[in-house]
Image (cartoon, helix red, strand yellow):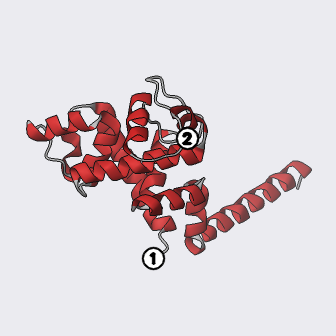
Amino acid sequence: MTKRKKIKGKRKRWFLLLLIVVLAALFIRSEWIGRLVYPVYYMDEIKQNAERYGQDPLLIAAIIRVESNFKENAVSPKGAVGIMQLMPDTANWILKQEKFGEMTVEDAGQSADAGIRLGTWYVKELRRQFGDSLPVVLAAYNAGPNRVKQWLNDKVWDGSESTVRDIPYGETRHYVQRVMYYYKKYQKIYDEK
């Protein structure tokens, strides 16, 4: 047997061993693998603000994942800022609704904690306006509450998860689907109930 064949044989054995270890990890520690594939950053800030405003921290994490992928200084092409991608006008409106101390729109765009606090308050407000229909709340977060009210009033969309495909804006339709996907993943991986 040549030296080259021996090396090839060793590589195959190492690859096979690695494959077995990975497959075993998937079956034995799927939670660990899930947390590796679907990480959540800023969990302390998310939990604190979710508790403050009565929201599910895993929902807030899913919104953040889709909005900015946990980048606290993110700025969208349309001008949305921060980890929860609030439009500056929306952030200004939020700041006027409740006492946030000296917090500014700039803080929401540069500080994860400030962005999470304002974004979580906004989710609470959208739930107040639209009830517990999560697809409707998410659509309003993305497209704005007035547009979503119009879609619902004009019977363009009934607001259910099963008819998300009827949302007239492709970006919003895709947004709702993605947040719901991550929310369900996070519930499976991180739910501590």
Q: Is residue 157 above or below residue 168?
A: below
Q: Few, some or many C-alpha atoms within 10 Å of disc 1 (few <14, some 14-19, many ≥20)?
A: few
Residue shown at 46% from the left, 63% from the top = 51
| Whole-percent x, y for residue 186 in the image | 47, 60
Residue 17 in view, yes or no: yes
Q: Quick one: 51 or 31, which is closer to the camera?
A: 51
Total count of labels: 2
Left or right, residue 101 beside residue 155 = right
| Whole-percent x, y for residue 170 in the image | 29, 32
Residue shown at 72% from the left, 65% from the top = 17
The quadrant holding residue 73 is top right
Disc 1, SS: loop
Viewer-nearest of discs 1 and 2: 2
Q: Is residue 106 above or below residue 102?
A: above
Q: Quadrant of the N terminus?
A: bottom right
Residue 155 in view, yes or no: no
Left or right, residue 116 beside residue 21 = left
Sequence-first disc among 1 and 2:
2
| Whole-percent x, y for residue 144 in the image | 29, 35
Checking the image for residue 102, the label placed there is: 2
Q: Amino acid at mark 2?
A: Glu
Q: Quick one: 106 or 103, which is closer to the camera?
A: 103
Q: Amino acid at mark 1?
A: Lys
Q: Few, some or many C-alpha atoms within 10 Å of disc 2 (few <14, some 14-19, many ≥20)?
A: few
Identify residue for label 1: 193
Q: Quick one: 4 or 179, which is closer to the camera?
A: 179
Q: Quick one: 79 or 129, which is closer to the camera?
A: 129
